[in-house]
Image (spheres, rainbow, N blue to C red):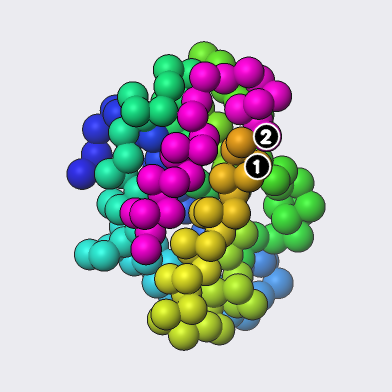
Amino acid sequence: MSNDNNIFGCYVSVTGGNYTDTQEQKDLAIEQGRLFRSYIWGDSGICDTLKKLNNENYGKDLKLALFQFYVNPIFFEIDNLPEIENYRKKEKSIGIPIIVNDNNFFSKSEESRIEFLKESILQKMDSLEEVVKKKKLDTDVELLRKDLVKLLK
């Protein structure tokens, strides 16, 4: 279910381990990447759910809010990831980073993992709203949040 009208999209970046890691640690990182992708794009992945919301229903200034999931990012990435990226006027898009690691995802139960994804996405709506206000975009974030809450229940 993909078209140019989806207001939300998903991107996953997986760190395959550090050069000092053992092969076992690198294999675990790759396996965790596969596992996480199944929660995003698998049979009941959250990305298909998010794509039910059409950008035309919320205004003309924002065509895509891209949830960027960083799986086990290295310290350099963590230190340099913003709460939310700048609005890209030409693309009419905003990148929204979310860090995924052992503490908040992989050590949790199936139910807790799904809840983490939903809560993380909903929490990022506050940051999105700030950018929309700051840049004076016509995006109806309140309606978007309301529809998103309904969708994720």
Residue 87 highlighted magenta (yes or no): no
Callout 1: SS: helix
Task: Determine whether, in the image, residue 48 is placed left or right of residue 7.
Answer: left
The CA distance from mark 1 to mark 2 is: 5 Å
Residue 120, quarter of picture: bottom right
Which residue corresponds to mark 2?
A: 130
- Asked if one can make out residue 28 in the rendered structure from this viewpoint, the answer is no
Which residue corresponds to mark 1?
A: 127
Q: Main secondary structure of the magenta part?
A: helix
Which mark, residue 105? none
Question: Which residue sits at x=41%, y=28%?
Answer: 58
Name the residue nearer the viewer: 35 or 43: 43
The crowd level at tag 2 (other Cα within 10 Å; few <14, some 14-19, many 20+) is few
In the displayed structure, 52 sits above or below 72; it is above
Residue 9, quarter of picture: top left
Task: Determine whether, in the image, residue 13 is placed left or right of residue 76.
Answer: left
Name the residue nearer the viewer: 122 or 82: 122
* Part of the protein shown in magenta: 130-153
Residue 5, position as x, y percentages in the image: 30, 29
Which amino acid is tagged 2?
Glu
In the displayed structure, 29 sits above or below 90; it is below
Question: Which residue sits at x=24%, y=39%?
Answer: 2
Residue 23, position as x, y percentages in the image: 56, 79
Residue 126, position as x, y percentages in the image: 63, 45
Kindly indicate whether the residue at mark 2 contacts the one at mark 1 (C-beta within 8 angstroms): yes
Question: Which residue sits at x=50%, y=25%?
Answer: 139
Which amino acid is tagged 1?
Ser
The crowd level at tag 1 (other Cα within 10 Å; few <14, some 14-19, many 20+) is some
